Image (tube, grey):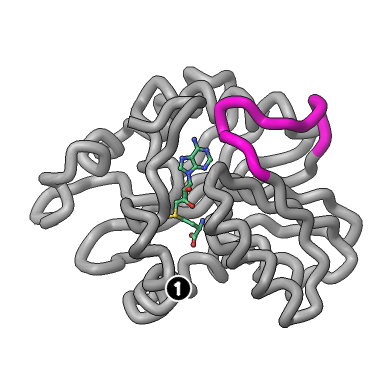
């Protein structure tokens, strides 16, 4: 399980990382990223943080769509961050890449207008998710909001439900953890299917 001291990399194994972008592109994860960024309603002068940025897909989408926003991508995996940085350099997109853990964010309180996190929460066990969500709440400015997409919601007839960490995101688990972390305004905003699995979008504030 991922705690503040270790982490599960994007594809579960370092040597599989080069396959992450082609694989996620193939299964349609890019549309999740685009939908998440649209949901976040990012303003031109917003400070934005992407937690569990991996190879940078969400942060780069934000930077491309909102050139006046300040964009930060955080991940514990230096190999994934190196790929993200290369992609940003090639595209000429100014993103600040930060090595760190969701449970111990290296930022001052009230630093961001928007925090986004895609397909990363399920890399943490339940208590670690609550710690990371509380950290995200700490770094959000008053009036700011958190936008999540992850495997979650109902897992009936879902082949991935046999995965322990994915099963632990079932039902109301993510909204409950958001409330446990102190968010008062929590909403499920939609869902899409990837690989026959339900990916659910959430918004949290307060
Ligand atoms: C499946 S990848 C998702 C990457 C990216 N958000 C995307 O949607 O393409 C999950 C990412 O979560 C990161 N991760 C794992 N544990 C973490 C933690 N404790 N805090 C922040 N990120 C973590 C992994 O290193 C990995 O890059």
Q: Residue 73: x and y, percent?
A: 67, 52
Q: Is residue 31 left or right of residue 85?
A: left
Quadrant hosting residue 70: bottom right
Q: Is residue 150 above or below residue 90?
A: above
The answer to whether residue 65 shows anywhere in this view is yes
Q: Which residues are magenta?
A: 99-111
- At label 1, counting other C-alpha atoms closer than 10 Å, the crowd grade (few under 14, some 14-19, many 20 or more) is some
Q: Residue 134: x and y, percent?
A: 59, 23
Residue located at (65% from left, 70% from top): 61
Q: Is residue 109 above or below residue 19?
A: above
- Badge 1 is on which residue? 21
- Indicate the quadrant containing the N terminus: top left, top right, bottom left or bottom right: top left
Q: Is residue 187 left or right of residue 12?
A: right
The dominant secondary structure in magenta is loop
Q: How many marks?
A: 1
Q: Is residue 16 magenta?
A: no
Pick whichever, 156 or 7, lies toward us.
Answer: 7
Q: Is mark 1 within 8 Å of ligand 1?
A: yes
Instruction: Give the structural element (helix, strand or loop) at label 1.
Output: helix
Q: Is residue 112 left or right of residue 176?
A: right
Q: Residue 121: x and y, percent?
A: 43, 41
Residue located at (58% from left, 19% from top): 182
Residue located at (43% from left, 38% from top): 7
Q: Is residue 164 above or below residue 134?
A: below
Q: Is residue 30 left or right of residue 96?
A: left
The answer to whether residue 183 shows anywhere in this view is no
Q: Residue 116: x and y, percent?
A: 61, 49
Quadrant hosting residue 146: top right
Residue located at (56% from left, 60% from top): 36
Pick whichever, 188 or 137, lies toward us.
Answer: 137
- Indicate the quadrant containing the C terminus: top left, top right, bottom left or bottom right: top right
């Amino acid at each position: 399980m991922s705690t503040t001291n270790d982490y599960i990399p994007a594809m579960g194994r370092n040597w599989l990382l080069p396959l992450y972008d082609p694989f996620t592109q193939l299964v349609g994860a890019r549309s999740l990223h685009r939908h998440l960024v649209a949901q976040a309603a990012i303003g031109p002068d917003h400070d934005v943080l992407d937690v569990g940025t991996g190879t940078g897909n969400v942060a780069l989408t934000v930077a491309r769509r909102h050139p006046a926003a300040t964009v930060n991508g955080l991940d514990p995996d230096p190999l994934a961050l190196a790929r993200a940085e290369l992609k940003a350099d090639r595209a000429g997109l100014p993103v600040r890449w930060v090595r760190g853990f969701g449970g111990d964010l290296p930022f001052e309180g009230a630093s961001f207008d928007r925090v986004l996190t895609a397909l990363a929460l399920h890399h943490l066990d339940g208590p670690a998710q609550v710690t990371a969500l509380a950290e995200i709440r700490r770094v959000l400015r008053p009036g700011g909001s958190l936008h999540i997409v992850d495997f979650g919601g109902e897992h009936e007839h879902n082949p991935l439900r046999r995965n322990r960490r994915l099963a632990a995101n079932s039902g109301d688990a993510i909204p409950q953890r958001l409330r446990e972390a102190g968010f008062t305004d929590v909403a499920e905003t939609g869902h899409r299917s990837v690989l026959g699995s339900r990916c659910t979008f959430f918004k949290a504030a307060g």
